Amino acid sequence: MDFWMNALWSVTPTIVIGTFFGFIIRACIVGDRNERRMRQQVEAEERARLGLPPKEAAASNAAASTATTK
């Protein structure tokens, strides 16, 4: 019994710190995803406010114009 308690106490800090690290990394990834989504939304609103085409249309038009000039 003493062996298993020692093994449990030896592994517990690794599991706790690994779990804590996993939560921190997950929070960073989710935060980054939300930040990118909000940035795209703000950019789309600004493009609409300025009367510019949506970003997808602008990118495809730019690609088409460079393909025809080569």
Image (tube, rainbow, N blue to C red):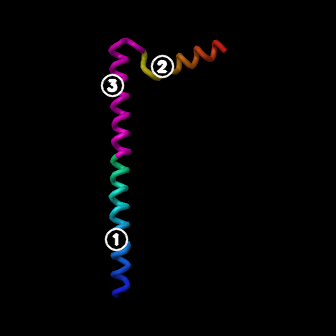
Please tell me which residue is depicted at 33% across the width and 81% down the height of the picture.
5
Q: Is residue 31 above or below residue 18?
A: above
Please tell me which residue is depicted at 60% across the width and 16% down the height of the picture.
66
Mark 3 vs mark 1, foreground winner is: 1
Name the residue type under label 2: Ala
Side (left or right) of 28 relative to 60 = left
Find the magenta span and give its range: 28-52
Q: Tell me if residue 33 is in the magenta stretch.
A: yes
Using the rendered view, name the quadrant where residue 33 is placed.
Answer: top left
Question: From mark 2 to mark 3, how far is it between C-alphas?
Answer: 17 Å
Residue tagged by mark 2?
57
Disc number for residue 68: none
Residue 40 image position (x, y, % from top left): 38, 28
Mark 1 or mark 2: which comes first in sequence? 1
Circle 3/circle 1 CB separation < 8 Å: no
Circle 1/circle 2 CB separation < 8 Å: no
Disc number for residue 42: 3
Q: Nearer the viewer, residue 4 or 54?
A: 4
Q: Is residue 41 above or below residue 2?
A: above
Query: What element does badge 2 sit on?
Result: helix
Residue 36 image position (x, y, % from top left): 38, 34
Disc number for residue 12: 1
Query: What element does badge 3 sit on?
Result: helix
